[in-house]
Amino acid sequence: PFRTIVVLLFLGTHSNNSSELRYYMGQGLLTWEGAQTACRADGDDLARILTQEDYTAFQSITETQQYDLWIGLYWKTSTRMWQWSNGDSFPYCVSEPQLGASNCCSLTLACAALRQYVCQRGKN
């Protein structure tokens, strides 16, 4: 099964026109797959955070949240790599997640856990 990241601590230097992105909180508590389905039902996707500008926009809508949130980054067991929900790889976390020992990404949870989630609307 997938292991999913909910907190992103390391930001890459990937270029991105973030001014065309808009993050928003999804409705209710869902599994990771449920959150992905809900975002995609509106033509959007789970949040991807690729730049400092993305992080600032993401943080502006999530800073008051006191709970873990699903975003679009997950551990794909078949490839043993982190990837975004749109299929793009995430090369900054090159090893399998280990609780307490990860220096790029933090807080892995079972995808079946019910969490709030953040969607993104935009060109990416």
Image (cartoon, rainbow, N blue to C red):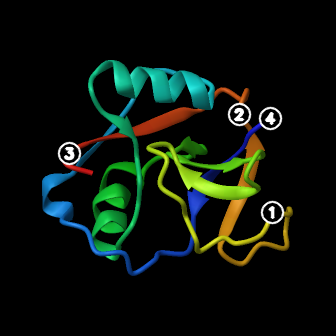
Query: How far apart, in angstroms, are the residues tagged by discs 1 and 4?
Result: 13 Å
Residue at x 35%, y 72% (from the top left corner): 51
- Quadrant of residue 106 within the rendered picture: bottom right
The residue at which mark 2 appears reads as: 111
- Quadrant of residue 44 within the rendered picture: top left
Lower sequence index among marks 4 and 3? 4
- Quadrant of residue 101 within the rendered picture: bottom right
Query: How far apart, in angstroms, are the residues tagged by discs 2 and 1?
Result: 16 Å
Residue at x 37%, y 26% (from the top left corner): 40
Query: How far apart, in angstroms, are the residues tagged by discs 3 and 1?
Result: 30 Å
Identify residue type, mark 2: Cys
105 versus 110 height, above or below: below
Picture coordinates of residue 69, whole percent (x, y): 55, 43
The residue at which mark 3 appears reads as: 122
- State which mark lies toward you, 2 or 1: 1
Where disc 1 sits, the SS reads loop
- Is residue 29 visible in the rendered structure shown here? no
Task: Say which of 55 and 78 sits in front.
Answer: 78
| Residue neighbourhood size for the residue with mark 3, other residues' Cα within 10 Å, grouped as few (<14), some (14–19), many (≥20) | some
Query: How far apart, in angstroms, are the residues tagged by discs 2 and 4?
Result: 8 Å
Residue at x 74%, y 39% (from the top left corner): 2
Lower sequence index among marks 2 and 1? 1
Label placed on residue 96: 1
Are circles 2 and 1 on residues that touch, CB within 8 Å?
no
Are circles 2 and 4 on residues that touch, CB within 8 Å?
yes
Lower sequence index among marks 2 and 4? 4
The residue at which mark 4 appears reads as: 1
Query: How far apart, in angstroms, are the residues tagged by discs 2 and 3?
Result: 25 Å
70 left or right of 13? Answer: right
Identify residue type, mark 3: Gly
Query: How far apart, in angstroms, are the residues tagged by discs 4 and 3?
Result: 29 Å
